[in-house]
Image (cartoon, rainbow, N blue to C red):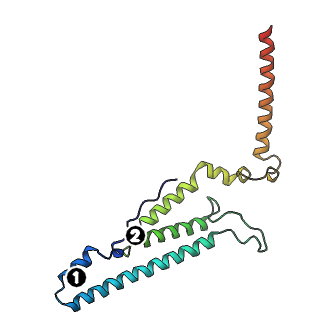
Amino acid sequence: MPEPTPIPIPGILDPERAHLLGELNAAEDGEQKVADLQQALADTCGYGRDLWQGVDALRSYLLNSLPPDPRSPGLHHTGASPTGPDDEVGWRNWMAAYAEAHAVLAGPNGDSGFGVSEASREAQTRRSAPSVRLLAEHPELQPGRPVGSRPPGSLPSRLARVLAVATTTLAVRAVLVRRLRRR
């Protein structure tokens, strides 16, 4: 799995950022220095609140993406959301959560939509892969499914019959070739 694109730590979190130090050194009176520090603290706290809200939204998304509590009544899906390539709502929610996390991490000025385009690209890659489409169309092929859970006549049982016939044919052929060589 490729590593995500690194996001540099925003300058607003650097207490020795050049912009702030320049303002403090240029200020002639103490009151101006205090005002500049208060503004820097307010900006940093504002970004801190944005980070907190972003992490809280991400926490909510992660909780809502879980499969339902199996002890609750009704039929349940067993995977997290998005549940597959055709789960439009699940993918839309995933892309929104990813883009929001990316934008918040980029800093107070956001990421100019980079997180949205990256989320869209990653979702498309995962939704359109041939193997994913095949598994979505044939859930009986999912790894780890008990053999008895596959309906009779499904691809795996047909495949097993074909493999059995092919193996038997090859074994008979091998025996016949050995007998013919002995003559």
Query: How far from the left and from the top, in percent, is residue 7?
Result: 40, 64
Q: Quadrant of residue 173?
A: top right
Q: Which mark is residue 106?
A: 2
Horizontally, residue 92 falls left or right of residue 20, namely: right
Which residue corresponds to the image point at 71% horizontal and 54% vertical from the top-left?
139
Position above or below: 160 against 25: above
Query: How far from the left and from the top, in percent, is residue 97?
Result: 52, 70
* Residue found at the far bottom of this picture: 31
**Which element is circle 1 on?**
helix
Mark 2 surroundings within 10 Å by alpha-carbon count, few (fewer than 14), some (14 through 19), many (20 or more): many
* Residue found at the far left of this picture: 28
Which residue corresponds to the image point at 31% horizontal and 86% vertical from the top-left?
39
Q: Quadrant of the C terminus?
A: top right
* Nearest-to-viewer mark from 2 and 1: 1
Position above or below: 158 against 179: below
Q: Which mark is residue 24?
A: 1
Task: Kindly check if marks 2 and 1 are in contact, taking CB atoms under 8 A apart as contact.
Answer: no
- Foreground residue among 57 and 151: 57
Position above or below: 21 against 170: below
**N-terminal label among 2 and 1:** 1
Q: Quadrant of residue 104?
A: bottom left
